[in-house]
Image (spheres, rainbow, N blue to C red):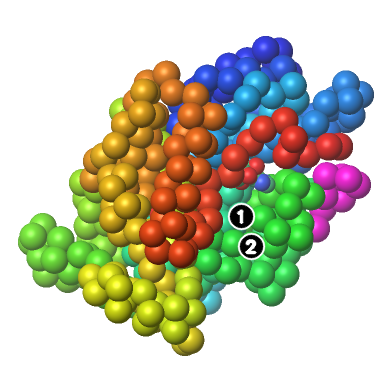
Amino acid sequence: MKIQENISLKAYNTFGIDVMASFFAEVESKEDILEALNFAKSKMKPILILGGGSNVLFTENLDALVLKVNILGIKEIKTNDKTVLIEAGSGVIWHELVLYSLDKGLSGIENLSLIPGTVGAAPMQNIGAYGVEIKAVFHSLEAIEISTGLIKTFLPSEVRFGYRESVFKTSLKGKYIICKVSFNLSKIHTPNISYGDIQTVLDQMGHTTATAQNISKAIISIRQSKLPDPKEIGNAGSFFKNPVIPASDFDNLKLKFPALPGYPNASQVKVPAAWLIENTGWKGKQIGEVGVHKKQPLVLVNYGNGKGEEILDLSHQIQMDVLSKFGISLEREVNVVNFENLINV
Ligand SMILES: Cc1cc2nc3c(=O)[nH]c(=O)nc-3n(C[C@H](O)[C@H](O)[C@H](O)COP(=O)(O)OP(=O)(O)OC[C@H]3O[C@@H](n4cnc5c(N)ncnc54)[C@H](O)[C@@H]3O)c2cc1C
């Protein structure tokens, strides 16, 4: 394992924010991770764990060791009549796992096609799209405890998945490095096409059957038409979570804003953050080099040389406007990274 010094992180985050890390290492095995942790201890530097950098916002230079997790490999662990247990290294690109699954005729993650990032980061926020979250196929994961170097296996009940949440974002934040993740994929395909435009796009593409392959193609097409490609415009996907509010609050708001959309779930209602942002006038606005995307107001963008602080400031302005107009607090989905919230080893 090579430890490099004074590395720009611009190429390692999809916002394209240019900050410097004092030390940087690509770790390809558990042994590399332990060696890197020892190095950080000896230099008395905190660490940052990084996958594809598609859910982080860097707001300053990091006097730290950045560990880019690059543990690769996908393998079949066991199979029965209905399912196949697949294990993937945490550095595997998420969409490559989706393609592997489709290639083997398996299903369960086709609705999560084209989500950027790595397998290791996927359980962190229980990635989800088009009516599916990884918790539906998650079997277990193996992680290194940073303070002891010991390996622990986590079962679904211990990961405590929620909406863009897991124990790794709450009580165990900064405590573990995920090394591999296992998923139960299905040999029998049950299409999930009730969400959004999937059926319409399948029809437009001339696909008469909703196979996992066809659903994946439809979702790729929808995503490419709606979301900015980070290779062209820096972004980290949805900047905020969709707020979930009590049904009584929603009913009151609906009296004042009859067009307010909402998706009821028990005694609560999920409100699209994109609608709230658009209806406070932020859609398509640009401030210097940063802004709110023209088509998808939930996505904040870096048009070139924007700074992390500028995007964070913009996000605060949006939060204030949404709070003052609708009385709803928007919670951030993206992980803001500054020196204060790095992991001490
Ligand atoms: C265009 C675009 C579209 C997106 N669409 C979606 C979407 O539809 N649904 C969705 O859920 N998300 C979406 N995202 C967000 C992002 O793709 C996911 O959150 C993804 O899982 C992040 O993976 P990553 O490897 O890039 O993580 P990073 O950004 O590198 O890291 C994210 C967090 O996880 C931690 N972390 C990373 N790897 C590990 C590890 N091995 N062990 C422990 N901690 C780790 C990091 O420290 C950080 O806190 C989108 C992003 C973009 C840019």
The quadrant of the image that shows the N terminus is top right
Quarter in which the C terminus is drawn: top right
Q: Disc 2 to disc 1, how far (Cα)?
A: 6 Å
Residue 203 located within the stretch drawn in magenta: no
Q: Where does the image place residue 337, in percent across and percent down from the top left?
A: 63, 36
Mark 2 vs 1, N-terminal side: 1
Marks 2 and 1 in Cβ contact (< 8 Å): yes
| Residue at x 48%, y 71% (from the top left corner) | 244
- Front-most of 297 and 191? 297
Foreground residue, 226 or 296? 296
Q: Is residue 3 above or below residue 257?
A: above
Which label was assigned to residue 124? 1
Question: Looking at the picture, how far across and down is residue 143, in whole percent?
Answer: 74, 52
Q: In x, y percent, where is residue 104?
A: 39, 59
Is 148 contained in the magenta span?
yes
Q: What is the crowding at mark 1: few (fewer than 14 residues within 10 Å), some, or many (at least 20)?
A: some
Mark 1 CB within 8 Å of ligand 1? yes
The residue beneath circle 2 is: 166
Mark 2 element type:
loop
Query: Image point 65% across, 51% down: which residue?
Result: 180
| In the displayed structure image, the side of residue 66 where residue 220 appears, left or right | left
* Residue 258: % across, % down: 24, 74
Is residue 206 at all visible to an observer of this figure? Answer: yes
Magenta part of the protein: which range?
Answer: 145-152
